[in-house]
Amino acid sequence: MSHSIAILGASGYTGAELVRLIATHGGMEITALGAHSKAGQTMAEVFPHLRHLDLPVMSKIDEIDFSGIDLCFCALPHKTSQGVIAALPRDLRVVDLSADFRLRDPAAYETWYGNPHTAVEMQGEAVYGLTEFYRAEIRAARLVAGTGCNAATGQYLLRPLISAGVIGLDDIILDLICGVSGAGRSLKENLLHAELSEGVQAYAVGGTHRHLGEFDQEFSALAGRDVRIQFTPHLGPFNRGILATGYVRGEAEAIHAAFAEAYAGEPFLRLLPLGQTPSTHHVRGSNFCDIGVAADRIPGRTVITAALDNLTKGSSGQALQNANLMLGEPETRGLMLAPCYP
Amino acid sequence: MSHSIAILGASGYTGAELVRLIATHGGMEITALGAHSKAGQTMAEVFPHLRHLDLPVMSKIDEIDFSGIDLCFCALPHKTSQGVIAALPRDLRVVDLSADFRLRDPAAYETWYGNPHTAVEMQGEAVYGLTEFYRAEIRAARLVAGTGCNAATGQYLLRPLISAGVIGLDDIILDLICGVSGAGRSLKENLLHAELSEGVQAYAVGGTHRHLGEFDQEFSALAGRDVRIQFTPHLGPFNRGILATGYVRGEAEAIHAAFAEAYAGEPFLRLLPLGQTPSTHHVRGSNFCDIGVAADRIPGRTVITAALDNLTKGSSGQALQNANLMLGEPETRGLMLAPCYP
Amino acid sequence: MSHSIAILGASGYTGAELVRLIATHGGMEITALGAHSKAGQTMAEVFPHLRHLDLPVMSKIDEIDFSGIDLCFCALPHKTSQGVIAALPRDLRVVDLSADFRLRDPAAYETWYGNPHTAVEMQGEAVYGLTEFYRAEIRAARLVAGTGCNAATGQYLLRPLISAGVIGLDDIILDLICGVSGAGRSLKENLLHAELSEGVQAYAVGGTHRHLGEFDQEFSALAGRDVRIQFTPHLGPFNRGILATGYVRGEAEAIHAAFAEAYAGEPFLRLLPLGQTPSTHHVRGSNFCDIGVAADRIPGRTVITAALDNLTKGSSGQALQNANLMLGEPETRGLMLAPCYP
Amino acid sequence: MSHSIAILGASGYTGAELVRLIATHGGMEITALGAHSKAGQTMAEVFPHLRHLDLPVMSKIDEIDFSGIDLCFCALPHKTSQGVIAALPRDLRVVDLSADFRLRDPAAYETWYGNPHTAVEMQGEAVYGLTEFYRAEIRAARLVAGTGCNAATGQYLLRPLISAGVIGLDDIILDLICGVSGAGRSLKENLLHAELSEGVQAYAVGGTHRHLGEFDQEFSALAGRDVRIQFTPHLGPFNRGILATGYVRGEAEAIHAAFAEAYAGEPFLRLLPLGQTPSTHHVRGSNFCDIGVAADRIPGRTVITAALDNLTKGSSGQALQNANLMLGEPETRGLMLAPCYP
């Protein structure tokens, strides 16, 4: 028996990625697709790569009948999402891919996103969607807030080390390079091929990137004290993938052991042998996150690296993984696609 | 019950693509991997993106025990393949991805490949592996010769038109651009990133590309007379994908209708509405081949276009499709992956 | 003594390319930069790569004082350009990079561009800017209309052959792939990196591309009869460069000889030895156009190829070459930059 | 009057880049080109983009007559270079682009490069070629050792800050991403387009990259004490460019002021306004190095970034700048090319 699924925001990259993954899931049927400006169009018109699938035409969200829907993915932009979700039936399972319910503290939300939250009453209900660390809560949740793609990468790289107490907390540096699909299908000059290909640039330098709100919230809760990391993202000339390089104080062996323990049995976290480094090439199109650890030549310092696909493990794959839990499906269903390489 | 599968030439791109596809097939188990210089290594060492899979270590081919193997994919280089296949058990089902058994006429083989064929006796046994046009023969075959990736693209674009008699046969022009994975994982200067990215060049200009041997053989057989097309391939700065643009004499409507009839019910051939054009982006990582037809401003001339992924539909996906037929599996099993876009 | 130069449309790619070339010209000083929405900004803000140059702030065009300006480059969009140029002082030398004055016949202009021309009286005055073929006229001209980038490539490839009578005129096919900067710095979904990189697609299929207006005009005039070619452009995943592949009836040796004669002494046209093919990589950032000729395996047919950089030889380099002629400078001044490879 | 120039190692990327730059220098004539395996070939065969230049055929190095040569660029691989240079006339000015004479201490050389130096007696004579910091010595030098491309980038980013005493010396972190041409034109699997495009990976993780030898030597000399930085390079999917991101303790304003003072009047160092970040796109093909400074949200920490083109400012442009000084030419001659963007 198939679950009936709605996807709001189907005309964006994370929406299309959900459709791609669900196409071979086997236990889900997409019965409603919601969009704004592209309502009335077919998925084949908006994303021709999906033209072989039998999908509903895109509708305005307020014209969708949610009775009978088992779970709704909400892949809308930040700020839009909170209003839409507040208007959905209160018993509908929702996996939100936006930033709107990631921060539990309304003041933190306002600080990082620049506007007051308009659905404050639902913030308490939302469960943070980093599956491997919130599994039990997600299973029981009605509303799950998917993590940011950079935030997911950084947390896979740092959470086990903070929990195990194997690194210093006062000078963690996270340097990261992200592919362009992380910015969505929006018409911005800096996302044009001619502006991006064949080069690289840092952005949001100096601790201004919004995903720091998630790092602060999660790492501080984990450590039981305030943790503030340094974080510099770069925009790279590729479509999919995030590579994070972390600089920490701690012994490489202990760090590697902490990862090995934390990720033993995890189906999507692939820890590399000590000294090896992951590549975004090797996770493309998949739900895997690869982790590497190497001792630095300076005693007591270690370089840690993580790679994942921002659209899959960093967003829509994570969302499907959470939906599987919420619907009582096997967690890995539809998600064991091998990376697409080369 | 799973079929036991061997892959020879597992250290190349088409070998890795076979593993990627079989990983979610469900009815096949890879029990032997053969390689030359990389024998003794694990697949994870040679292709780290596949490190989550439980696979046999690569062996020298002559050390593989083929008893119990249901089907063997042979993804070895041209010229090597014929000798290896000749030495395999004579009752073992084989899908060859090389060029060695594509040409039925030994003289044609020698003309295009420059050396005499060393397994002439097996050429008659081999079935040409363009699934949609040789389905019955493939089902019954022991040895299937996968088509060239350019040859597949050109045939999807031209066979139905030649069969239906809707185009002139004396001035067919096929202009094509192929991604770099078509050249394999070989160490050649022109395949370096610095030589290839951000530009494009024609090669094998003037009718010297080996896949013309396949075009000549197949189109002539189909037409019942000699057919010689013009064919210029280009090497483009992308990894996966072939786009073919054909210039033919004939009416666009009749051509579109001939495609519609020929490809009705075909699971992997997606015919676009008249006037639209396919993109390699929209087939990446999938087994689909998209087809477009547009009338030219000059009466009686039509421009036809086809896009497929050279590693999937052009090679390993096609091979798996054929293997499914040979093993009595559903033809589409393991092959309904949606394209990976963006 | 330096010529005083104005550039209108300085915030686009062809405007920036003019500034790049003039930066090492030595005999020109940029004294005015005109822009619309970016008026008031510095060039360093709009194009940070040019931040070392001492340039005027961008002004609204109607605030520029053209007295003292020796020559004005107009790098504005089609349709905008004609009105702006009509309003300039009538004795000001102008090199227009838009399409507005390329077609001598107002009816042809309206057919291809979809709107009536608003400066019909100036169309007669304009000289077509394909330097090598209109040198004398350009030297004497007040208003020069730069050719389209695809149109330039196709003409370098076909004019000498039509003039020499060495090819058939009734079945010329021009297949072309162009880099993305040819579409300018405009915010269109299909120009995003995520939509373009790692793939290729045809566009304007079937004889609908506007540069056909130039081909029709020029080839027909040259042949003394109507000539209509088939032309399919493709958009490739690279920023600079056009590669044109032509399919013609004619003997390769005669064709090569016709090129050799036509381009002997031309500083920017590099004819390759018979059988070799040019690459866009080898002209990037330069004013060169490389030409290749190869006999097809079918007797009497020849494949011809040309490569140039659309922003340089196809647009701003060509414009500077013309400006040099109009100002009495050596034609190659500022244009002998070697291609930037890799 | 032109200086007579020899280039050894002309068949590599840095050799070709030297030819590209010298082509518009005006005061240099290339009279000898040396190569190993490609001796006997023309430059047009090895690098077709340079086919318009009138250049000598490549010779075996021991067949070159160095009498009459004013300066010799040596663009050979590490280890090869030292023997070749030792065999050159002792009064010939030499600019070496390899690593062989960068480290003054033979033990340090052996540590980082794994073999004993075979021309130890010349190490003392060699001047370190980071022009802006060794100008007087270079002017007087016979043998100049060009810096490593990563080493140059890191030093432009850190030297003024160490000299001015505005940063802490014990926890400097340098994270860097480099384009693929930095690895040269060598046939290695990881340099293939299919392996590199559309993704990113760290390498030489943990303080094992050879350019650390230069950092240790230079930063320690500058600080008057041992300085050991952490350094992680990444390989990015682009051909030209290095972007370095540095994490330092210090106040952003003081750091910006230190750069402003150190680089005032420097023709090739472009300091951006406080808070802005450079891009490799904006230096491509040029001799510029752009520098950015931004305060971190954590008080007392600053993020600094630098971008340059590894083949130009990081290698051949730097070499030409040094050659200009050695020959009494204006330092910027032939080097004021504006970046090639997009």
Image (tube, coloured by chain):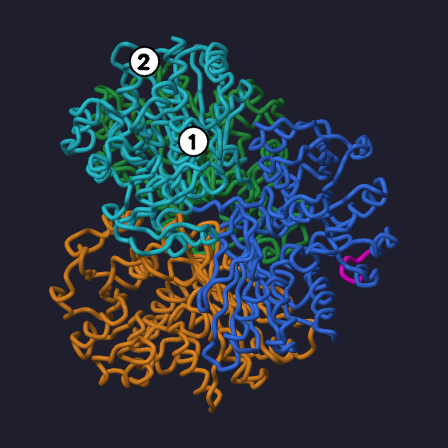
Chain colours: A cyan, B blue, C orange, D green
Horizontal arrangement in the rendering, residue B286 relative to residue C334 (left or right): right
Look at the picture and state if A171 lies above or below B34.
Answer: above
Look at the picture and state if D223 lies above or below B11.
Answer: above
Residue on which the image places disc 1: A243
Q: Please, what is the three-letter code of the amino acid marked with disc 1?
A: Leu
Specify the principal SS of the magenta part. helix
* Residue under the image location 53 percent in, 55 percent down: B236
Q: Position of residue C105 (x, y in %)?
A: 32, 85
| Label 2 chain ID | A
Q: Please, what is the three-letter code of the amino acid marked with disc 2?
A: Leu
Q: Quadrant of residue B27?
A: top right
Closer to us: mark 2 or mark 1? 2
| Label 1 chain ID | A
Q: Describe the element under mark 2 as helix, strand or loop.
A: helix
Q: Viewer-proximal residue, B336 or C139?
A: B336
CA separation, marks 2 and 1? 23 Å
Q: Position of residue C330 (x, y in %)?
A: 38, 70
Q: Give the range drawn in magenta.
A: B111-115
